[in-house]
Amino acid sequence: MDKYSRATIREFMSPSNIGSIENPSGVGHITDNADAVELTVYISVEGGRIADMKYRIAGCTALIATLSVLSREVLGMTVEDAFALDMAYVSRLLDGLPESKWRCAGYALQALQMAISDYRSRAQ
Amino acid sequence: MKKIVYLDNAATTPVDPAVLEEMRPYFSEQFANPMTYAHSSLGDTAHTAVEEARKRVASLINARPEQVIFTGGGTESDNWILKGVLERASRERLHKPGHLVTAEFEHHAILHSALALERQGYEVTFVKVGRNGIVDPDDVRRAMRPTTVLVSIMHANNEIGTIQPIAQIARIAHERGALMHTDAVQTTAHIPVDVEAMGVDFLSISAHKFNGPKGVGAAFVRDHESLYPFVDGGGQEWGLRGSTHNVPGIVGMGRAAQLGRERLTSEMKRLTALRSALFEKLASRIDRLTMNGDAQQRLPQNLNIRIDGIDNEALLLAMNEAGIIAAGGSACTAQETVPSHVLTSIGCDVKEAKASIRLSLGLVTTNEDIDYAADVIPGLVRFLRSMA
């Protein structure tokens, strides 16, 4: 039986950094009707490092908890390092996220990567 | 201890203390095998207890005692009836693989049995279900073939609680020479279940859905000659279901059936009022909230609602943190992230299905429980919607 860790429940019940950023450096947006997910990630980048991350989310517990923990974890990270984060890493931050939830929680990383790509295309 | 408001009675119910009391002697004191009754006074006591339980269950569904066969639960009854009837009628009467008619929104005990039969070469038609969650008898009529040997439509759906026109469907089945089964796991001891009024040939029951113990159920079998055994063994249950009787379980089921019969009218009235109050309060406090399934033709204890813009898994976890236990789909699919097949069968899209929760009331549900749920759930919905 796949069960959420207390850390996951805690993140989900009091998520960090919900909201949006005015004049973001990059935005990533995902809508997936099959998974009933709608998600927008905003980042601001300063000197090649992520200075802020915020998000708006309608989705499952795993995705909300992942976004919450990720929004703190990426602060100060280079965009390259942030882009390379994977679910195994995120799962450790949540004291273990059931693997059956990785696909859905993975939208958080996808949206972050889209925001970083958006930042890179704007920077060019 | 943290307050727990249990609104998942469609998944299972607590054993009634009076039921447990009646079961207790049959573990260690009256432990004998009922099949030894002819030469053993202990066996005779156990045998008498099993037969008394059989009478009580029979009385609950207006059957004759010998038409009640004890099984290991509702799922076993469903498996046995579908497979036992299809196999026997196909081999002995049709001399070719027979046809089963059932519905898309059946419990997995039926759906997966039907798919297993298909794999073995039998034919199955899954009738579609209307947006109101009710099977149209005319759709069943259109699905009938000369080779149809069994029609199996649930008495009430386990997720949305909609009650099906079983008597009408049974008439159609019989007109075409087929037998009729209904899975009455959600209805027995909750609304009137009368095998004669419904005109069914088979019916499945599970004890733990009406405050009896888990691991015991029954099948109503009108004619013992209409199906092959499923569990072959030592000749118990007229040779229809081998295995030493689960005496404490059967005794508990009998007591639960008796109590259920006594309480039926008052509980229907009480739970209908509580369910309506819960729906009205939630609907007045949460916008974009809809009831899934017909509002009238439904079980008193079932409320299934769709709350646009929320994910049911997230809401259920937040409710659990607040001490309210409910369900998304059925308990049997709780570990999956796929949307409910019941809700998609009545025309909900994936997003709507994943925005739906089932609140199921029961004997243990109080007015205070309903007030607490109606006070707490709206705040949790606001919390989730505020993230979007």
Image (tube, coloured by chain):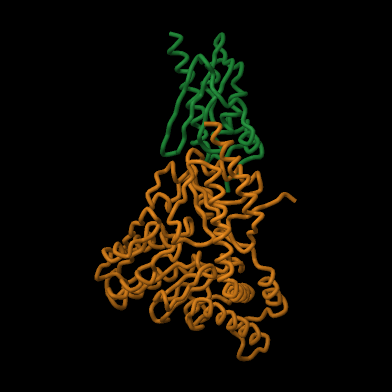
Which residue is at a point 49% across and 72% down the rendered structure image? B192
Q: Is residue B271 left or right of residue B356?
A: right
Foreground of the two, B299 or A34 = B299
Foreground of the two, B49 or B57 = B57
Residue reaching furthest to the bottom: B39
What is the x, y in percent for residue B274? Answer: 58, 58
Q: Is residue B164 left or right of residue B381?
A: left
Q: Does B138 sit above or below residue B66?
A: above
Which residue is at a point 57% across and 54% down the rendered structure image? B277
Residue reaching furthest to the left: B146
Colour of chain A, in one word, is: green
Residue B14 visible: yes
Q: Is residue B237 left or right of residue A76?
A: left
What is the x, y in percent for residue A113? Answer: 48, 22
Q: Does A123 sit above or below residue A36?
A: above
Tally of marks: 0
Chain represented in orange: B
What is the x, y in percent for residue B108? Answer: 45, 58
Q: Is residue B332 left or right of residue B323?
A: left
Which residue is at a point 51% across and 14% down the rendered structure image? A23
Which residue is at a point 35% across and 55% down the rendered structure image? B130
Q: Does B313 sit above or below residue B297?
A: above
Q: Does A83 sit above or below residue B145?
A: above
What is the x, y in percent for residue A56? Answer: 52, 28
Residue B86 visible: no
Foreground of the two, A92 or B262 = B262
